[in-house]
Amino acid sequence: MLKVEARRSGLEISEPVVACLADLAFQFSEQLAKDLERFAHHAGRKSVNTDDVILSAHRNEHLAVSLRSFCDELKLKEPQSLKKRRRLPGKEAKAPTCAVHISDL
């Protein structure tokens, strides 16, 4: 992806720089996944949801606003039949509709 963007911009990026950025992106992704699991576990859930993802962006307000907006758009596009089916009693009723199951910690 980096090479494609560089070509599109008319730039050249050396292989060591590409490797370094790829490593940084991988490390960031690993840490983000761990944080999301912790947020879900702290909330007493086994699934990561959109609230966890938005919480992970709390240090970057622009990103948090963009994620909230994206989540709201997804909720608006969701068919009404799915919205009704996902309603559960209790605490889970408040959970956003987007979720990913994670294994036990």
Image (spheres, grey):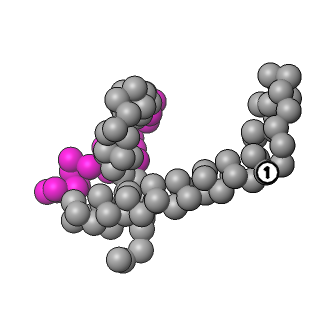
Q: Which residue is mark 1?
A: 16
Identify which residue, 35 or 10, lies in the foreground: 10
Task: Report the span colored magenta.
Answer: 74-98
From this viewpoint, is residue 83 visible? Answer: no
Q: Position of residue 89 (x, y in %)?
A: 16, 56
The count of marks equals 1
Q: Position of residue 90 (x, y in %)?
A: 14, 57
Q: Is residue 60 left or right of residue 8?
A: left
Residue at point 77%, 31% (across, down): 5
Q: Is residue 76 magenta?
A: yes
* Residue type, numbered disc 1: Pro
Q: Position of residue 24 (x, y in %)?
A: 60, 53
Which image quarter is the N terminus in?
A: top right
| Outermost left residue | 90
Query: Counting other residues with Cα less than 10 Å from the Cα at mark 1, is it few (<14), some (14-19), or many (20 or more)?
Result: few
Q: Position of residue 16 (x, y in %)?
A: 79, 51
| Outermost top residue | 9
Q: Is residue 5 magenta?
A: no
Residue at point 56%, 58% (across, down): 27
From this viewpoint, is residue 39 visible? Answer: yes
Asked which secondary structure carries label 1, the reply is helix
In this rendering, is residue 30 above or below 25? below
In this rendering, is residue 49 above or below 105? above
Identify which residue, 27 or 96, lies in the foreground: 27
Magenta span dominant secondary structure:
helix
Residue at point 45%, 55% (across, down): 32
